[in-house]
Image: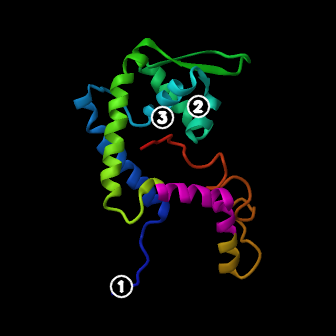
Amino acid sequence: MSTQRPLTGIGTRLRHLLDLLEADLATAYPRLGLVDYRPRYTPVIRALVAHGPSTIGELARAMGVTHSAASQTVAQLGRRGLVELSVGRDARQRVVRLTEEGERLLPVLDTEWAVAEAAVADLDAELSVPLATLLGELERALERRPFRERVADAAEALTGGPAAQGAAGQPFGAGGGAGSPAAGHDEGHEH
């Protein structure tokens, strides 16, 4: 039996799994009549349906992604003609709303959501713990103790002293990291 360490880390494996899930979900889109549509669009549209016209910051909070990720997805949706932006109360704010074309997609997107949920239920039947349960546990664990703190503690334990210095001369765990609100989720993925 081999005791070799895996050649890929958890981040690589998680990105790979997300890529697999999204690519496979997208294979159903032509059958549903969705052309030039990506899985990352659905959470924005669902948030707009639930909350009405929203700023990009409000959308980011509703979806649990960074402002940058929400902004990138909104820009893509705008190029597709599914959303439009207008100036908010503050000239720096942009309010996002569905266009008529975006609203026409809603029945199809309800079907897309139901298809994705059914596929997740099928996957869950093969897992020791439902995926949503595990993801919720992971999110709560990182809220209690961010990953940057875990990295700093591991670096200290493995180096035998105070937290090791990062490339910029800051201790590991200083500043934004994987556990910070602005880190992760940059792709705005769902499903």
Within 10 Å of disc 2 (Cα), the crowding (few <14, some 14-19, many 20+) is many
- Residue at 64% of width from left, 55% of height from top? 179
Q: Is mark 2 on a helix, strand or loop?
A: helix
For disc 1, the marked residue is 2
- Residue at 61% of width from left, 61% of height from top? 141
Residue 161 point in image, percent of width and height: 75, 79
Name the residue at the bottom extreme.
1
The N terminus sits in image quarter? bottom left
Q: Which mark is residue 59?
A: 2
Left/right of residue 153 with respect to residue 26 in the rendered view:
right
Q: Which mark is residue 20?
A: none
Q: What distance separates the C-alpha of mark 3 from that of mark 1?
A: 42 Å
Left/right of residue 106 with respect to residue 86 in the rendered view:
left
* Observer-nearest of 17 and 160: 17
Within 10 Å of disc 1 (Cα), the crowding (few <14, some 14-19, many 20+) is few
Q: Is mark 3 on a helix, strand or loop?
A: helix
Within 10 Å of disc 3 (Cα), the crowding (few <14, some 14-19, many 20+) is many
- Residue at 32% of width from left, 44% of height from top? 118
For disc 3, the marked residue is 43
Left/right of residue 41 with respect to residue 62 in the rendered view:
left
Q: In which image quadrant can residue 178 be found?
A: bottom right
